[in-house]
Amino acid sequence: MAQSHTAQHGAPRRRSQSEYLPVAMRVVSSLIVLCALLTAGFTFYPEWVRLSDMKRELAKQKDRMEDLRNLSQAREQEIHLLETDREYLEMIARDRLDLMKEGETIFRFGTGQHKS
């Protein structure tokens, strides 16, 4: 009995080909899945980065458009005032031409720049 016990555990047993097949199939299927994931990653990652850049650029352009819309509204309002409000027109003309009415005193505070 002692001899049969050492014979069973002493020498390594060789696996048959049928035992390797399931392991090989798992390895091959894992490699196929890995290749598919890598292919998808390399295919879609640059597009994802491009999409992110485009979204960021779109947000910048929307901000710029909003700023321009506000500027346009301010200019339209100024045009309306210049066309319809005589007092506003006089005030702007006197300010830009450095004119004043008789008996009027003008005090200027601000930037410290002098016109020459």
Image (spheres, rainbow, N blue to C red):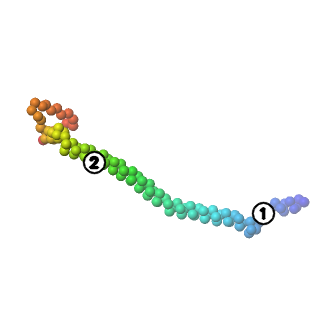
Q: Is residue 110 visible?
A: yes
Where does the C terminus fall, quadrant-wise?
A: top left
Local secondary structure at mark 1: loop
The location of residue 7, given as percent across then percent down, is 84, 62
Instruction: Say few, some or many: other residues with alpha carbon within 10 Å of mark 1 (under 14 / 14 to 19 / 20 or more).
Output: few
**Relative to 93, does residue 107 appear above or below in the rendering?**
above
**Relative to 70, does residue 32 appear above or below in the rendering?**
below
Residue at x 38%, y 53% (from the top left corner): 57
**Residue at label 1?**
12
Amino acid of disc 1: Pro
The location of residue 36, given as percent across then percent down, is 57, 63
Q: Is residue 92 visible?
A: no
Amino acid of disc 2: Ser
Local secondary structure at mark 2: helix
Identity of the residue furthest to the front in this view: 84
Front position in the image: 13 or 46: 46
